[in-house]
Image (spheres, helix red, strand yellow):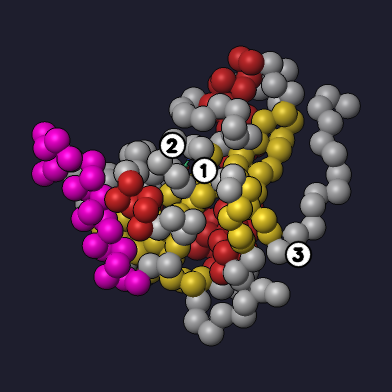
């Protein structure tokens, strides 16, 4: 049984760049497709487009400069402690990494265990890390895709919540494949938020069990 929420889920988004996934979540919330509210958008980049998007929608945005923390032996943890303070001030229940180009430490991972998600443009566990669309093409993959997963300390390693697959075409470049994958990212990230808001996700070791999930019925065969 899914939980019907009395109040919208309180979400924070951490983003470093253009923020198209942030936008997809904003749009889903505004369209009533996700029972959530974004209570904080935080970036490590002052000029991140994601922050502009937040402001445009009247959301609270924060730039947390990593520079003052640099040089300390615990610089990454200290940075995350300052993020954690902001998250706690806003009573954040779910944290979304959306193009957040900084590795999160145990400080955040432990505070938000099973309550922090990331979106990654590959079918994990294939191709963690960077430049993954190029890696999928170079490897000769016929299918590529994207993954929403819970965040653990290992980069792109946490339990998988949702994946979407797309075909890889012979004439694909990293850019054309990334664009095809991005369309799916914008669908599955809001969906993962809504599943969380409904209380339908249960982490069981490496697996995320989804209450009342309907498995996709169509096989994706590429090429046909
Ligand atoms: C997306 O491809 C996401 O999967 C990856 O970084 C990119 C961020 O894009 N983690 P955007 O900033 O959400 O547009």
Which image quadrant: the C terminus? top right
Residue 71 x/y as whole percent? 11, 34
Q: Main secondary structure of the magenta part?
A: helix
* Residue 163 can be seen in this image: yes
Task: Provide the secondary structure element on which disc 3 rests.
Answer: loop
Say whether residue 170 is left or right of residue 160. Answer: right
Label 3: how many Cα within 10 Å (few below 14, some 14–19, many 20+): few
Seen at 14% across and 35% down, the residue is 73
Residue 128 x/y as whole percent? 51, 30
- For marks 3 and 2, the one nearer the N-term is 2
Residue 183 x/y as whole percent? 63, 44
Residue 212 got which mark?
3
Q: Are marks 2 and 1 in contact (CB under 8 Å)?
A: yes
Q: Is residue 35 above or below residue 15?
A: below
Task: Provide the secondary structure element on which disc 1 rests.
Answer: loop
Task: Provide the secondary structure element on which disc 2 rests.
Answer: loop
Identify the image quadrant of residue 153: top left
Label 2: how many Cα within 10 Å (few below 14, some 14–19, many 20+): few
Residue 72 in the magenta stretch? The answer is yes
Distance of mark 3 from mark 2, alpha carbons?
29 Å
Seen at 62% across and 77% down, the residue is 3
Say whether residue 66 is left or right of residue 120. Answer: left
Q: Which residue is mark 1?
A: 158
Distance of mark 1 from mark 3, alpha carbons?
22 Å
Please report the bounds of the magenta region as a residue range.
Answer: 67-91
- The residue closer to the viewer here, 8 or 161, is 161
Q: Is residue 188 above or below residue 166?
A: below
Q: Which residue is mark 2?
A: 154
Seen at 44% across and 36% down, the residue is 155
Label 1: how many Cα within 10 Å (few below 14, some 14–19, many 20+): many
């Amino acid at each position: 049984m899914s939980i019907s929420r009395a109040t919208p889920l309180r979400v924070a988004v951490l983003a470093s760049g253009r923020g198209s996934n942030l936008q997809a979540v904003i749009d889903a919330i505004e369209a009533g497709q996700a029972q959530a509210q974004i209570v904080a958008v935080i970036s490590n980049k002052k000029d991140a487009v994601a922050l502009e998007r937040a402001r445009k929608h009247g959301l609270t945005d924060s730039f947390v400069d990593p520079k003052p923390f640099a040089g300390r032996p615990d610089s990454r943890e200290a940075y995350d402690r300052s993020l954690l303070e902001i998250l706690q001030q806003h009573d954040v229940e779910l944290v979304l990494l959306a193009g957040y180009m900084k590795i999160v430490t145990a400080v955040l991972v432990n505070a938000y265990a099973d309550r922090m998600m990331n979106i990654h443009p590959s079918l994990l566990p294939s191709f963690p890390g960077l430049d993954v669309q190029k890696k999928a093409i170079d490897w000769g993959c016929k299918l590529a895709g994207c993954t929403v997963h819970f965040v653990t300390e290992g980069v792109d390693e946490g339990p998988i919540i949702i994946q979407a697959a797309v075909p890889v075409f012979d004439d694909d470049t990293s850019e054309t494949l990334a664009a095809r994958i991005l369309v799916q990212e914008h669908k599955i990230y809001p969906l993962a938020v809504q599943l969380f808001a409904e209380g339908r996700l249960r982490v069981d070791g490496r697996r995320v069990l989804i209450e009342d999930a309907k498995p996709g019925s169509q096989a994706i065969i590429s090429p046909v």
